[in-house]
């Protein structure tokens, strides 16, 4: 397993370096492999495609870290999420601008909806109503984060997460 993570990290590092100088759409699996001197077979052993690699980067750098913490309220998680995106804004600004099937935007939105469903409050009248709210707020959060990261001088993460918390409070009252 350790060798697997070493390979994945090498591919991740190569991809991130390439993304600094090329748009996502112009980076091929071949480019990533060439950058870290691996063959395509190694890449495909670990990842389905470059979208899967991006999702793995997010999962290992953020999700695995926050899973070790206890978040009594959804908005506390949102604050850490905003800090993470702010600290890595050059990368995630580019990645969130990619849309469509298998994109990180789609993966991130689905992950947000799943997390929100875990924070369902009793004050929400029904599962159907809450599911609708989670889908709605998942879409809204993705759009807001994309807009925030695209601003040349985006506001600090604490300020942005405070604004998000204000919007989320009707659905997550314990925020």
Image (cartoon, rainbow, N blue to C red):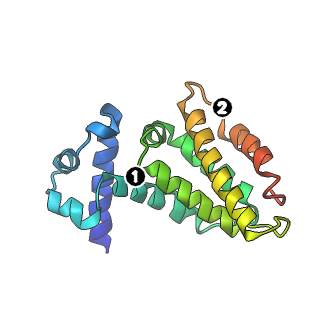
Mark 1, secondary structure of its residue:
loop
132 or 51, nearer to the observer: 132
Where residue 43 appears, x then y in whole percent?
22, 59
Residue identifier under label 1 = 101
Seen from the viewer's position, the closer of residues 120 and 13 is 120
Say what secondary structure mark 2 lies in.
loop
Q: Position of residue 145 (x, y in %)?
A: 59, 41
Residue 103 versus residue 66: which sits nearer the camera?
103
Quadrant of the rendering where the C terminus is positioned: bottom right
Marks 2 and 1 sit apart, C-alpha to C-alpha, by 30 Å
Q: Nearer the viewer, mark 2 or mark 1?
A: 1
Q: Of all residues shown, which one is farthest toward the bottom?
A: 1
Residue 41 position (above or below residue 18): below
Foreground residue among 139 and 61: 139
Answer with mark 2 or mark 1, whichever residue precedes in sequence.
1
Residue on which disc 2 sits: 155
The image position of residue 151, as x and y in percent, is 57, 27
Give neighbour class at mark 1: few <14, some 14-19, many 20+ (Cα, 10 Å): few
């Amino acid at each position: 397993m350790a060798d697997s993570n070493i390979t994945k990290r090498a591919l991740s590092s190569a991809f991130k370096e390439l993304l600094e100088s090329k748009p996502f759409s112009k980076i091929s699996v071949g480019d990533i492999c060439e950058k870290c001197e691996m063959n395509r077979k190694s890449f495909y052993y670990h990842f389905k495609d470059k979208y899967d690699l991006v999702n793995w980067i997010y999962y290992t750098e953020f999700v695995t870290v926050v899973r070790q913490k206890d978040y009594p309220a959804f908005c506390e998680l949102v604050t850490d999420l905003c800090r993470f995106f702010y600290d890595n804004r050059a990368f995630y600004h580019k990645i969130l601008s990619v849309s469509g099937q298998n994109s990180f935007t789609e993966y991130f939105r689905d992950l947000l909806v799943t997390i929100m469903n875990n924070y369902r409050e009793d004050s929400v009248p029904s599962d159907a109503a809450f599911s609708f709210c989670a889908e709605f707020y998942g879409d809204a959060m993705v759009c807001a984060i994309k807009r925030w990261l695209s601003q040349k001088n985006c506001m600090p993460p604490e300020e942005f997460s405070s604004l998000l918390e204000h919007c989320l409070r009707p659905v997550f009252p314990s925020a």
